[in-house]
Amino acid sequence: MSTLLKELEEAKRLGAEAAASSTIGQAVKRVGWVADTWKRVVSSLTYIWAKWLSPWLGPIGWVFIWTVIYPCAWLWRKIAWFRGNFSPLKGAVALVSQAAYLFVAWQSIFLAFHLILFAFTHTSESIYLSNAQELGVFDNVFSVQGCEAVQGSGGEISCSGDNTLYFRSDGTLFTHLWSLVNKGGLYYPEYVTGPVAPGWQKCYTYSYGIRVKMFMRSWDIYPIILDTTCRSI
């Protein structure tokens, strides 16, 4: 009887080992399948990058590496591992430092873009504006609508889809700097668009930006009004 019990226990143990080995084998196969799939995906992405994207996006990738990856890695190494040891406090300070750096870097890129855009597109002109409204209470962005129409002999103003104009008034870093240099104070969108009362106004405006309808509708890129002086007609 004892021999039978021993044989049963031995068979039970062998069955458990076989089941365990079968489970482990299945897990190993799954891990191998995932690794093989990942290898193929990486190989495909590498081919796409090397053959199709790198000739066009390579410089952008290097700019991203030198302006984002390297500085953030340097901050982490210098702060989180200060004096050769790591602590949660130093890690938190390093993360805050990285976030501050990325914010300053983004604002610098944004400012440089608007400086270049302003240098090539700024213009002073006399146009007709008819409507100014606030788009968002929290964003403090205003929209100004008008057209380049010529006033008729009877005083009438007619606009069409070909000569309609749309502007934005937004307090960005660039508009604040421009206002400080030229007006001695910060840029307030509600004051800039304040002269545009309801109804047609003949306005002298100073603005910059690209007036392409595709950019306006698709990417929400509108010309920016910097200054307005209006009189009713």
Image (cartoon, grey):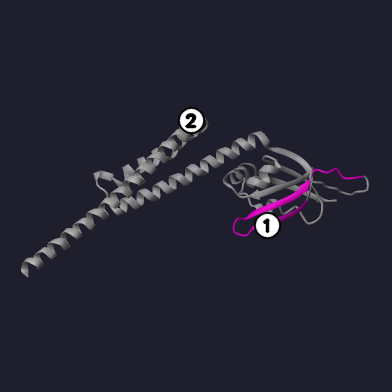
> Dot 1 corresponds to which residue?
134
- Disc 2 on helix, strand or loop? helix
Give me the residue at 64% from left, 37% from top.
Answer: 118
Q: Which region shows up in magenta?
A: 130-152
Residue 76 shown left or right of residue 195 in the figure: left
Task: State the separation of the CA atoms marked 2 and 1.
Answer: 47 Å
Q: Main secondary structure of the magenta part?
A: strand
Based on the picture, tell me whether residue 79 belongs to the magenta stretch: no
Residue 225 shown left or right of residue 116 in the figure: right
Give me the residue at 67% from left, 45% from top.
Answer: 216
Based on the picture, tell me whether residue 149 belongs to the magenta stretch: yes
Q: Position of residue 26 (x, y in %)?
A: 29, 52
Residue type at mark 2: give it: Lys
Q: Residues within 10 Å of mark 1 (few under 14, many from 20)?
A: some
Quarter the N terminus occupies: bottom left
Question: Residue 51 got which mark?
Answer: 2
In the figure, 43 relative to 233: above or below?
A: above
Give me the residue at 59% from left, 59% from top.
Answer: 138
